[in-house]
Image: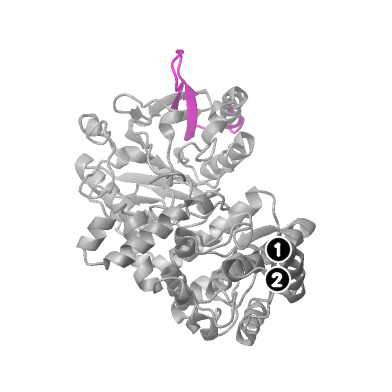
Amino acid sequence: MRLALAQLNPLVGDLSGNTRSILKACEHAEAGKADLLLTPELSLWGYPPRDLLLQPERLHQQQSVLDQICRELDSLHSDLTVLVGAAIAIEDDRQPGLHNTIVQVTRSGWQPVAHKQLLPNYDVFDERRYFRPGDGSSSLVLSNGLRLGLTICEDLWVDTELQRERLSGPDPVAALIDDVPDLLINLAASPFDASKPSLRRQLAARAALRLNCPIVYLNQVGGNDELIFDGGSFLLDHKGDCLLQMPYCQEWFEIWDSKPSHQPALSMPPPDTRDLLFRTLVLGVRDYSSKCGFQKALLGLSGGIDSALVAVIATAALGPDAITTLLMPSPWSSNGSIEDATSLANRLGIASQTVPIASLMQSFGSSLAPALDGEPQGVTAENLQSRIRGTLLMAVANQQGQLLLTTGNKSELAVGYCTLYGDMNGGLAVIGDLYKTTVFALCDWLDSDDSSCCRADFGLLHQGELVGEAIRTKPPSAELRPDQKDSDSLPDYGELDALLRLLIEERRTGEALVAAGFAPELVERVETMLRRAEFKRRQSPPLLKVSPQAFGTGWRLPIAAA
């Protein structure tokens, strides 16, 4: 059998455009004399379509585009079988009224052949809002007699020894044992986090061993709002050894031939986590910009490490000609920070403009003096600087039609070390799911020889350090008052981030952290800051999710709570 795999990057809700991508893959598959073409989970819709699934006119359009694929295959006189992901209505009056389905499409027609059995309803997933689970195993026998076992994404996640969460419900892999499939197929839309590439491979290998057959894992690729799908599709033999590995973070089409019968296993070392994290963030910025209709982006450049990393990611995503930076020095901005910001812009080849804010600070201060019985002081004065900068950035972005990128990190967002309507202004929080220590580690890697191939792939051709040692080694500071350091207000980032990971990603209690050896006063302080900052996070721009638990749609804590 010649098997075609289309690792597609859909636009959510664009059934016509996504169908065109599938038809293009059909043409490639036909040219390559493939027997079967696979596309990812919900490939007609893009994942996740959310409440677009509740619009009857889109469901009606789905019927039309499936018919269109049939007609196109017929016009090609093609015997190709295509598996596409669709949302198929259930013929009764109960809700939810859809199945997450694999549809078999040929020149003679289309029919549903498998329904997703395990519907994730945790973190960012809420499939039970839209879908009903399928019932029973799903096999498909092709005209050549080959029997395919069909599963959809979460249906493969049934190994309690490997995974963090196992949904209650059936074991779709075990249900296929009696069918004795010749090939197991998993069509997926699995978003990125750093643990996923290895975990997917392990889960697939276990399934291959249980069924004693090869397995194809085909994943969606691309950024859809906060979620980034890293692709990385693969094919394993019956022993769990890799026969085919597709690229990460890019659309890809591949044809695999099961002959000769002995396919040598590939030596596939795990991808470098820093390389894959950078590529994922670049993909997230590129797709969020293009899918939302932006061609250019703007950010404030301070000379600090956070804005430096965002500038590098944005340049890699959109190209230097599409990036503008604003330097907005105050009387408290150090000469070193201004020089560092300017030097970074020059290394990246991006435009930079300087708009000093000292006169605006004076004007705001004198205007507020009557209402405050004196000029703003303390945190009020510091926040006012941030809000002046946020207003300037929004004005420039509005005037020039740019996407404003915020530059705050996850550590700051966690403890509220950020200003509403100030540095939180923007359309996308690029590194809002990166702890400060991860920001430093990623910048260190970018300035090392290990990143040379990745930098070259994105046209970051400056010789030598990109971020720069001066930026990487200076003590973090918001520079909102003389000689200010982050350490004046926050614990050391190494200690803070270790606590935050346990509180956020593992949902550990303060008592458990104290029992684990953390100082009680530190735990209480960080817990309090995390809880009190919830109202800020609720008003923050969407962020790019790259961890198991981000401050996005999967974080659902109340604001007014004990």
Specify the segment rendered in magenta: 72-101
Spot occupied by residue 357 in the image (x, y as percentages of width and height):
73, 73
Amino acid at circle 2: Leu
Spot occupied by residue 333 in the image (x, y as percentages of width and height):
63, 80
Foreground pick, 111 / 325: 325
Spot occupied by residue 416 in the image (x, y as percentages of width and height):
49, 60
Q: Distance between the residues labelled 1 and 2?
A: 7 Å
Spot occupied by residue 410 in the image (x, y as percentages of width and height):
46, 61
Name the residue carrying label 1: 393
Q: Is mark 2 on a helix, strand or loop?
A: strand
At 31% from the left and 54% from the top, the residue drawn is 506
Number of dots carrying numbers: 2
Foreground pick, 27 / 228: 228
Instruction: State yes or no: discs 1 and 2 in contact (Cβ < 8 Å).
Output: yes
Image-quadrant location for residue 67:
top right
In the visual, does 107 lie left or right of 193?
A: right
At 66% from the left and 59% from the top, the residue drawn is 404
In the visual, does 547 lie left or right of 312?
A: left
Q: Earlier in the sequence, mark 1 or mark 2?
A: 2
Foreground pick, 119 / 212: 119
At 57% from the left and 25% from the top, the residue drawn is 59
In the rendered image, the residue lying farthest to the top is 92
Magenta-span inclusion, residue 74 = yes
Q: How many other residues sit within 10 Å of disc 2, few (<14), some (14-19) or many (≥20)?
A: many
Amino acid at circle 1: Leu
| Residue 143 visible within the image | no
Name the residue carrying label 2: 326
* Position of the N terminus by quadrant: top left
Magenta-span inclusion, residue 293 = no
Q: Can you say whether 389 is above or below 204 in the image?
A: below
In the rendered image, the residue lying farthest to the right is 399
